[in-house]
Amino acid sequence: RLADYGSGTVQWIFAVSVRDNTPVSPEVLAEQSEHKDVLIVQQGHRRDDTGVEEATTEQMLKIFAQIRDFQFRWLIVSRQDVFVHVERLVAALQGQNPPGGKVLGLWQAGVGAAATALAGAAGAASSLMAAGSAAAHQLDARFFALSRDVFSLLVSPQLMSRLQTSGPDASFGDKSLLTGGLNSWFRGFAVERISLPGMHFEQGLGATGRCPPGGTLALHPVSPEQLHALSASPAA
């Protein structure tokens, strides 16, 4: 349904991972040749409980670096097994005025221990740095949206080289995975942590393929067949 909003409103990028020395599939090459919307990244070695490969924070930063100069108001990041109701997402984004200093998604409050600040970003980016709150907030990394200024902070040369992409975090776990890495970074940012309505994760549709709960904005996990059916259904 994103195509209904036109190329001037929405632009999407597909991050496709490949193994070393493995040829890229003809279908991916054809997509890239026609639409210029594919980024090739080296395949990670992590899979979640459903068998889907998990992106790493190192992969994420490499992708962010390649789109650093893109112009946009919101950057939306979604895994391939998440169904997103586009109209509800767009309505939620349009309600965020001003669209700055915000991270939207499924936030859980009171997760983890006290925070420590990240430091070293200069200029305008420094206005988004803070000492952190007493209680950590955890963002679900399977689907989220960043305002442009938060993205600019992450890819700023002063900060990007300082962001840790490995090792354990006492509050959020493995920093090489998106959940651990992103949340350990955001902990020190003075951003608005906004929980989107209608986020239904961990339940999916099940084998019966029943309809999602009313008002669903994002649903996980879904199979490729379920994703196609939901995207084509006006009732979803």
Image: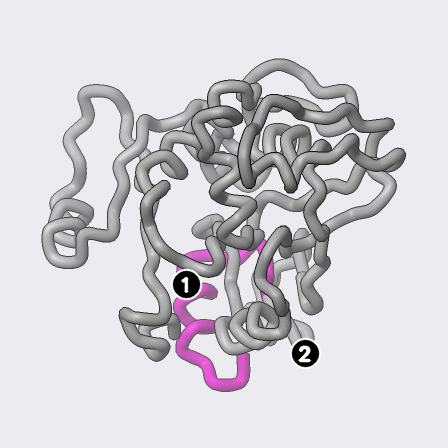
The quadrant the C terminus occupies is bottom right
Question: Where in the figure is residue 121, as x and y percent of width and height?
Answer: 57, 28
Left or right of 172 in this view: 71: left
Q: Badge 2, how many Cα within 10 Å: few under 14, some, many 20+?
A: few
Question: Where in the figure is residue 33, as x and y percent of width and height?
Answer: 10, 51
Q: Earlier in the sequence, mark 2 or mark 1?
A: 2
* Amino acid beneath label 2: Gly
Q: Please report the residue visible at 61 percent of the width from the left and 65 percent of the height from the top.
A: 98
Is residue 78 visible in the rendered image? The answer is: no
Disc 2 target residue? 214
Q: Is residue 25 above or below residue 121?
A: below
Q: Badge 1, how many Cα within 10 Å: few under 14, some, many 20+?
A: few
* Amino acid beneath label 1: Glu
**Image-quadrant location for residue 196:** bottom right
SS of the residue at dot 1? helix
What span is colored magenta in the figure?
218-236
Question: Where in the figure is residue 193, as x and y percent of width and height?
Answer: 72, 51
Q: Please report the residue visible at 52 percent of the width from the left and 65 percent of the height from the top.
A: 84
**Image-quadrant location for residue 91:** bottom right
